[in-house]
Image (cartoon, rainbow, N blue to C red):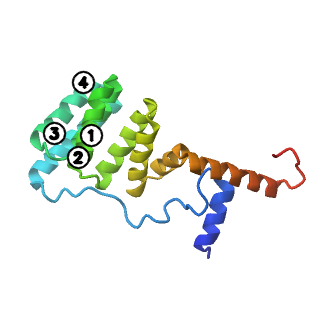
Amino acid sequence: MSSTHDWAVLQAIFNPTTPFGDVPGLNQVEEVTDDDSGFPSDLLRKVKDLELKGVAAAESGQVEVALGHFNQAIQLLPSRASAYNNRAQAKRLQGDIGGATDDLDRAISLSRGVGLTACQALVQRGLLLRLAKRDDEARADFERAAALGSEFARSQAVTLNPYAALCNNMLAEVVGKLRNPADTTTP
């Protein structure tokens, strides 16, 4: 049986871009979900159905139809975060980055920054911020999403962290020398 230390060493060898000791999934105790217990169950079922229809429409290229479904879901339960997150994706597909960002901000606010929807919205907003070259803000969103369990966000946060990048480069150099001790071309 492997220990945590064994996994950390293997992680450093096979994935030198992650910080030493960072074993993906190691700290995640349970699956992240949303707490929908405060919503009436019959209305929640309708909203979830509308969201599923919206996602299916967006995936088939019918973005306007998807937006209609998401708008209906928001009208039925305006204080539920998920439909805002989904609508943000449809708006992004239309090229409406400002509208997508507004919906992501709303989803994060309504979710109070916890749960699956918050995690997804933080990742999506982080990606939009990164595209806008607002790396410090993007890294903050990725770090928050990583704390909620997103391995993708964790990798993005590490990539955007200048100190981690420097440490990872030094570690990669050491690992390279260990793998190829006769190679004198590695600085």
Quarter holding the N terminus? bottom right
Q: Which residue is farthest bottom?
A: 1
Amino acid type, callout 2: Ser
3 or 4: tag closer to the N-terminus: 4
- At a point 11% along the width and 37% down the height, the residue shown is 75
Residue, disc 4: 64
Query: SS of the residue at dot 2?
Result: helix
Residue, disc 2: 109
4 or 1: tag closer to the N-terminus: 4
Tags 3 and 4 in contact by the CB under 8 Å rule? Answer: no
Tags 2 and 1 in contact by the CB under 8 Å rule? Answer: yes
Which disc, if any, is residue 105? 1
Vertical placement of residue 184 versus 69, above or below: below
Q: CA distance from mark 2 to mark 3?
A: 17 Å
Amino acid type, callout 3: Ala
Q: CA distance from mark 2 to mark 1?
A: 6 Å
Tags 3 and 1 in contact by the CB under 8 Å rule? Answer: no
Residue, disc 3: 73
Tags 4 and 1 in contact by the CB under 8 Å rule? Answer: no
Q: CA distance from mark 3 to mark 4?
A: 14 Å
Q: Is residue 2 shown left or right of residue 93? A: right
